Amino acid sequence: MPVPSASEFAGSVSLPTDAGAAALDPTVAPPRVPREAWFFLGPAFVASVAYMDPGNFATNLEGGARFGYQLLWVLLWSNAMAILVQYLAAKLGIATGKTLPENCREEFSRSTTLLLWVAAEIGAMATDLAEFLGAALGFYLLFGIPMFPAAILTGVVVMGILLIEHLGFRWLERVIMLFVALIGIAYALEMFVSKPAWRPIAFHTLVPEIHSSSIYLAVSMLGATVMPHVIYLHSALVLPRRTPEDRDGHHHRKMELFDVLLAMNGAWLINSAMVVMAAAVFFGRGMEVYSIQAAYQSLSPLLGKLASTAFGVALLCSGLSSASVGTMAGQVILQGFLQVRMSIFLRRLLTMIPAIAVIAYGFDALKTLILSQAVLSFCLPFALVPLLILTRRKGLMGVHANRPITNGMAYVATGVILAMNAWLLVAIFRGIS
């Protein structure tokens, strides 16, 4: 099932404050949430699933259990970068009517395009590994299904979710948004029962603190939050809402900014809740968490059966929804960079292989999940840099080209990501991390 083109899509388918929204682009004021805004809700929520996938569970769980509330600031700043990046990706699709990979293929040399495609596919494989592992773990923890059959069941369920697209892309969006709501409800419950300390939460959210011992997790949390594959995907997800009436795309861009702010800040709150829960329950009791299974089993005697069930449900919903979104992103990447159309179900089968191999060989799930997120962080510049280059070109973007303040923020975000990756390499080389 090929990814729909812009014409086929048509008609179907952070900065955590309003002041921050205006800072992204001074020409775009945040909307007042008119009734018509609901027509535009959806693309950013689908993209936001990648920001609360099983990789986030692993990094946030270990981050909270090992360092308490210390790394909450990483999530705040990662979210601010995610809002900026997703806004730029959406704006590129709105302005050009083409996805980021399609624009890369047309604007860059063939050798550059191939390099960007390889990096995108590596990121997609790392993402897929995390998502499959997480969903399989969810089935195992909740229903006692052994990991290998659980991985096969994950593939079957994900294909069933993707079949919903035959009813219309909006139905698939609604299913994904339902998964997001379930994850949010589960972690709201976790927050309620874990009784965290709010003063240190506020302090560590606003005041950065990092050491060589925590840089690996910090970079993994960054890679798990600013996900490269959904940068490509979001530029495609906005295409269904392009309308002939909005010829210059200003109204669409304003509505999409609202969608991005709502979805990304929701994802930030959920990620923060994961860290807070782990810090309150495990770090606060001096308990080390060596696996997601151990965390699940520990929650029941500490907080009750309801807490552990909520944890398992959130993990399962996260894995299933993000695996579906990851497959969609893979289609956009392959078709955009190489103009190759592949059945979405065939791609799903092929990308299951690495995850099933990891499960079959019995690799440590938590360590594998965290490693996959570090890989994503290294792949991120290969999506960010082209996005920044393209969105600043007036010849391509027209009136939607980045303003100087937007470019400045994007330069800072890219610089921070590269600096943290370099720090991680030094820490690993010196045997510190």
Image (cartoon, rainbow, N blue to C red):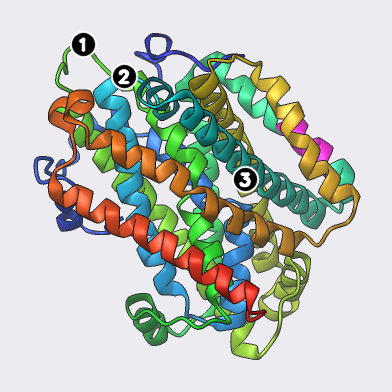
Q: What element carries label 3?
A: helix
> Which residue is at 30% across, 30% downward?
92
Q: Residue furthest left?
A: 27
Task: Give the position of the N terminus as an image quadrant.
Answer: top right
**Looking at the image, is mark 3 or mark 1 nearer the viewer?**
3
Helix or strand or loop: what does disc 2 sit on? loop
Q: Dot 2, how many residues are within 10 Å of its Cα: few (below 14), some (14-19), or many (20+)? A: many
Q: Nearer the viewer, mark 2 or mark 1?
A: 2
Q: Where is residue 221 in the image (x, y as percent from the top left)?
A: 52, 63
Does the CB distance between marks 2 and 1 fall below 8 Å? Answer: no
Q: Residue at x 70, y 85 (%)?
A: 287
Q: Could you tell whether 171 is left or right of 127 in the image?
A: left
The amino acid marked with disc number 2 is: Gly
Q: How crowded is mark 3: few (under 14 residues within 10 Å), some or many (20 or more)?
A: many
Above or below, comparing residue 192 to residue 31 in the picture? below
Residue 35 visible somewhere in the drawing:
no
Lateral position of residue 135 relative to residue 37, left or right: right
The residue identified by callout 2 is 97
The magenta stretch is: 151-157
Tag 1: amino acid: Pro
Q: Is residue 143 visible?
A: yes
Q: Which residue has dot 3 on it?
A: 127
Q: Which residue is nearer to you in this view: 243 or 113?
A: 113
